[in-house]
Image (cartoon, rainbow, N blue to C red):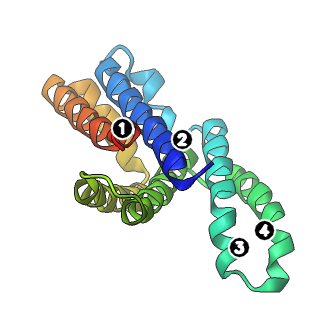
Amino acid sequence: MNESTLFQNFSLLFGLWWAAVAVITLLLSPKTLPWFEKLPRNRYVGILIGWVAMFGCIPHAAAVAPAFLLPYLLPIAVVTPVLCFFFVDYLFSRAVGGSFILIAYYFLHASFNTHYKYMPLLAVFCWLLGILGMWISAKPHIMREYIRSGARTSAFRWIAAAVALVCMTVFGLGYFLR
């Protein structure tokens, strides 16, 4: 699979991710708050996202790791999310934040390698996504506050869903534009 096809597939998947965020945001209400409020601390979904993120890191880590560490990269990628399962609070929030940082890095790198018309716009969104990922990773309770605000205020819910749809459009355009 060449770089352009890989970029298109990741664009489609991440666009669908933002569509799901918009739908979930619109589903927030005082009635659904008890179920959604538990999501940022969910360890089981967090460990799955952590494994996906760690396996995505292996090729990047292999380029900069010393030679004696290369055989240990896969075991480290398997064991680290398991340790996080037992010792890290807000695992889902931190895994999403870390994944946003990795995805922003990938799309920013791809924005310089693939030549689409809207790449400067994508680069700005990547920088914002990376900042959002760092913010969520550093303050994981922000995701819980986002859910609470969406459940309380319909204006916040509609504005946040609209922002998610804009992100869906920007990141998903890579699938349709050549």
- Badge 3, how many Cα within 10 Å: few under 14, some, many 20+? some
Q: Residue visible at 29% across and 21% down?
A: 26
Which mark is nearer the camera, 4 or 2? 4
| SS at circle 4 | helix
What is the spatial separation of the Cα atoms under label 4 and label 1, in whole angstroms? 31 Å
Task: Give the label, 4 or 3, closer to the camera.
Answer: 3
Q: Secondary structure at mark 2?
A: helix
- Mark before the other along the chain sequence, 4 or 1: 4
Q: Amino acid at mark 3?
A: Ala
Say which element carries label 1.
helix
Mark number for residue 172?
A: 1
To which residue does mark 2 refer? 41
Tell me if label 4 and label 1 are in contact, CB under 8 Å.
Answer: no
Whole-percent x and y of residue 112?
Answer: 37, 66
Residue furthest out toward the left: 155
Q: Nearer the viewer, mark 3 or mark 2?
A: 3
Residue at the spot of label 4 = 73
Check whether the beta carbons of the residues at disc 4 and disc 2 lie within 8 A of each other: no
Q: Amino acid at mark 1?
A: Gly
| Residue 34 in the figure: left or right of residue 82 | left
Q: Earlier in the sequence, mark 1 or mark 2?
A: 2
